[in-house]
Image (cartoon, coloured by chain):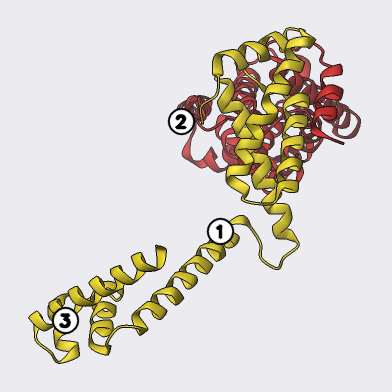
Chain colours: A yellow, B red
Amino acid sequence: MRIDEEVLRGLMVDGLDGDVAAHATLLHRLVPLLRGFYRRRMRGADDDVEDLVQETLIAVHTRRSTYDRDRTFGAWLFAIARYKMIDQFRRGARLQPLDGLEDQLVTAGFEDDVTARIDMDELLATLPDKQSRMIRATRLQGLSVAEAAQAGGIGESDVKVSVHRGLKTLMARVHGARR
Amino acid sequence: MTTDDLVIRLARDAGPVRRGAVGRRLGLGIAAGAVVSAMLLILWLGPRDDLGTAVQRASYWIKWGYTLSLSAAALALTVQLARPDSDRLRGLWLTAIPVVLLAVVGLLELANTPRSDWMAMWLGRTWMACPWLVLLFAIPIFGGLLWSFRRLAPTRLRAAGAAAGFTAGAFAASVYCLHCPEVSAIFVLTWYSLGILLATLLGSVLGPRLLRW
């Protein structure tokens, strides 16, 4: 993320030195910055984003003594922002039987995987049986052409041709659907 | 409350912050805890009877040198972990210096002692109590550090908890020196260090629960 490190750092240091106006300006400037940061990571849930922005502002304010004037301001700020986001995930996770962020992330990835596989199954079902079997064997199960040929009881060149034709058909269908 | 209102309210009270505020805050918490530990030690166990003459001997200063230098190294780690951007820890290796130095002293002592006395030297008279007493005296100091952390911003809670436990243990060991009658370096190296290690482990277990903010 591009932030105006020099300006923000200057405001922060002035604020720490007792310049109340600089501190107020800093907090104002952080609001859009933090909104952008959380929106990009929280997809949807605007209430959550605003809660996190406020919590982070409070933390930046009450814990500003932890900023080391010799280090980058951005690193300090986003370390706090990231911590607040992870904390929010943890709090949410405690309401569910799952424990810990890792589980949730794995589950979320699993869902994507499953959805992708369902899409793939639907597409392959539209192809002739041999083509879909050969695509499945070489592209999804990771068999080599020779192995797929042996498993399917057909010649190697037949496998290559089937896969090539099948993929071409699928490609045309997907592009067509997009248009 | 809208975010704009919040910003205005927050900006209203913004006192100046001096450099080194984190270290000062931690120091304050440690000092408060150490006073409690020292009071407990004096009222309950009492300082060692020969404290007046003991401080004239090298063994006492070796012991104190060990615990105080560990305290300093532990505090340096805690200061870093009390900040949110504590990705890279510096000076972890400093912890090894007092340990290695004390080990050298211990080996020299062993070399100058008949083998039949080694066991007695290692276990002393209080080896069973020493680690537990160090852990016990670490608790008030750890409490003081928890107070310090209420205004700090650790993001690696387990590591920060361990560092706080380590610091509490090392300072507790320094307090315990006022009572402990043992003199041998290998005693201190083993049983003091074990007490400090216990405090570190306890801190790492409690950190994720108690240091959240």
For marks 1 and 3, give the CA distance. Answer: 35 Å
Q: Amino acid at mark 3?
A: Glu
Q: Are marks 2 and 3 on the same chain?
A: no
For marks 2 and 3, give the CA distance. Answer: 66 Å
The kind of secondary structure element at disc 2 is: helix
What percent of the width, then of the height, locates residue A113?
46, 68
Q: Nearer the viewer, residue B101 or A46?
A: A46
- First-in-chain label (1 vs 3): 1
What percent of the width, then of the height, locates residue B24?
74, 17
Kindly identify which residue carries mark 2: B107
Q: Nearer the viewer, mark 2 or mark 3?
A: 3
The kind of secondary structure element at disc 3 is: helix
For marks 1 and 2, give the CA distance. Answer: 52 Å
Instruction: Kindly identify the residue that appears in the image at 69 percent across and 59 percent down.
Output: A93
Kindly identify which residue carries mark 3: A147
Kindly identify which residue carries mark 1: A105
Residue B67 falls in image quadrant: top right
Q: Residue furthest right?
A: B43
Q: Badge 2 sits on which subunit?
A: B
Instruction: Kindly identify the residue that appears in the image at 33 percent across and 72 percent down.
Output: A173
Q: Which mark is residue B190?
A: none
Instruction: Kindly identify the residue that appears in the image at 19 percent across and 88 percent down.
Output: A151
Q: Amino acid at mark 1?
A: Leu
Q: Quadrant of the N terminus of chain B?
A: top right
